[in-house]
Image (tube, grey):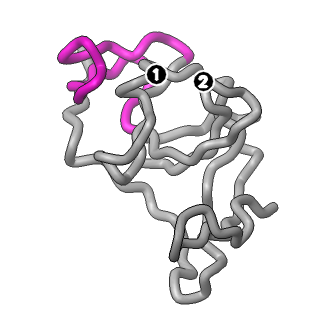
Amino acid sequence: MFNNFNVPYKEGLCRDIVLLNRWIAVTHDYARGDVVTLYAPDDPDRVITKRIIALEGDTVFTTLPYPDKHVKIPKGHCWVEGDDVFHSKDSNEYGPIPLALINAKVSYILWPFSRFSKVERVESSRVSVFKED
């Protein structure tokens, strides 16, 4: 399955064509660092791509504009952020995201061919996450 067909959206930039794993939306087999597509919490007609930073039970140290310095992720939710920290509308604006909004995991970048690769899990160094006992 493909998403984000190579359509210009900013001058000089093109979107990637990616391979999506939609089965993950059924199994809910998410991990910190996964790149996922989800319905935007403020616009259910728009699909966005973000990285999972934290899962339920984790505590995240947030960044602006989130009003609290840290938040514990409630059951059935996760914390997502864009890789471009200064140009991303993400959980720092929305708060914790319901897992039900996730519709796929990004598995591979297929195009442009120069970026062809598996999308690896990368845990964020920008956000501290810890499990409370």
| Magenta span of residues | 53-76
Query: Looking at the image, which is closer to me, 130 or 110?
Result: 110
Residue 65 to residue 53: above or below:
above
Residue shown at the point (45%, 39%) measured from the top left: 52
Asked whether the beta carbons under mark 1 and mark 2 sit within 8 Å of each other, the answer is: yes
Residue 122 to residue 27: above or below:
below
Is residue 20 toward the left or the right of residue 96 in the image? Answer: right
- Tell me if residue 19 is in the magenta stretch: no
Q: Quadrant of residue 44?
A: top right
Q: Quadrant of the N terminus?
A: bottom right
| Callout 1 crowding tier (Cα within 10 Å): few <14, some 14–19, many ≥20 | some
Is residue 22 toward the left or the right of residue 116 in the image? Answer: right
Give the number of the disc on residue 41. Answer: 2
Residue 85 to residue 12: above or below:
above
Give the number of the disc on residue 94. Answer: 1
Which residue, as the protein is rendered here, is positioned at the far front? 11
Is residue 123 toward the left or the right of residue 3 in the image? Answer: left
Residue shown at the point (64%, 69%) measured from the top left: 8
Is residue 106 toward the left or the right of residue 65 in the image? Answer: right
Residue shown at the point (64%, 37%) measured from the top left: 38
Q: Position of residue 58 (x, y in %)?
A: 33, 22
